[in-house]
């Protein structure tokens, strides 16, 4: 990876990564076969595209366009990247593409999006009833610094 890689200058970044115009056109063609035109536009237009194109070029060099197509086919099968706020669709698509490129095609696709779930929200949607909940303490909780660890000195019977 070049240290002075500038992802804002797409043509220079592709050149630095060794992806020539002919290879780039072939890669974009394979991506167009797998994704819808709008999704291709999002992916190719993303800032990380030169890095993804470099990885795709490596896969294409090792196993041909068929292997690259097999890697990218999982994007059509696993659409979890489509779910979520539209403001983060590109990031989820880039993550899903990277996952499909870095795992062998025979491996089942794992969910690409890492959705954070609020514990409070999941409890509010829980189907368990309060009776099925595990029994809790019957007394009110006392902060640890207020709990009495041992009997106070001189608090026993005196003679």
Image (tube, rainbow, N blue to C red):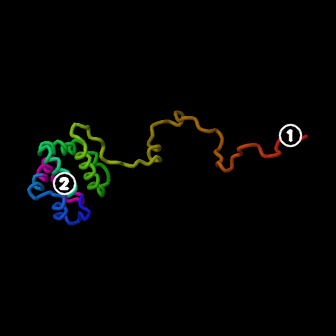
Q: Residue at x 20, y 51 (%)?
A: 55
Camera-nearest label, 1 or 2: 2
Q: Alpha carbon of mark 1 to alpha carbon of mark 2: how far?
A: 82 Å
- Residue 72, how many percent across, how many down? 19, 45
Using the image, determine if residue 20 lies above or below residue 65. below
Is-magenta flag for residue 41? yes
In the rendered image, which quarter is residue 45 located in? bottom left
Q: Earlier in the sequence, mark 1 or mark 2?
A: 2
- Where residue 144 appears, x then y in whole percent? 65, 48
Give the structural element (helix, strand or loop) at label 2: helix
At x 62%, y 39%, the residue is 137
**Residue 157 disc label:** 1
Q: Which residues are magenta?
A: 27-48
Q: Which mark is residue 54?
A: 2
Closest to the observer, 101 or 45: 101
Side of 157 where 35 appears, left or right: left
Q: Quadrant of the N terminus?
A: bottom left
In this picture, is 19 found above or below 106?
A: below
Q: Position of residue 85 (x, y in %)?
A: 32, 54
């Amino acid at each position: 990876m070049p240290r002075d890689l500038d992802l804002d200058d797409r043509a220079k970044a592709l050149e630095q990564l060794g992806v020539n115009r002919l290879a780039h056109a072939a890669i974009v063609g394979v991506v167009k076969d797998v994704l819808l035109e709008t999704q291709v536009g999002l992916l190719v237009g993303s800032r990380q595209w030169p890095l993804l194109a470099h990885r795709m070029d490596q896969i294409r060099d090792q196993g041909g366009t068929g292997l690259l197509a097999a890697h990218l086919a999982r994007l059509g099968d696993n659409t979890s990247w489509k779910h979520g706020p539209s403001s983060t669709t590109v990031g989820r698509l880039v993550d899903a593409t990277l996952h499909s490129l870095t795992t062998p095609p025979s491996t089942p696709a794992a969910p690409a999006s890492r959705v954070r779930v609020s514990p409070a929200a999941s409890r509010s949607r829980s189907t368990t009833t309060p009776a099925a909940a595990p029994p809790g303490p019957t007394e009110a909780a006392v902060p640890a610094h207020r709990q009495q660890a041992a009997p106070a000195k001189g608090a026993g019977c005196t003679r």
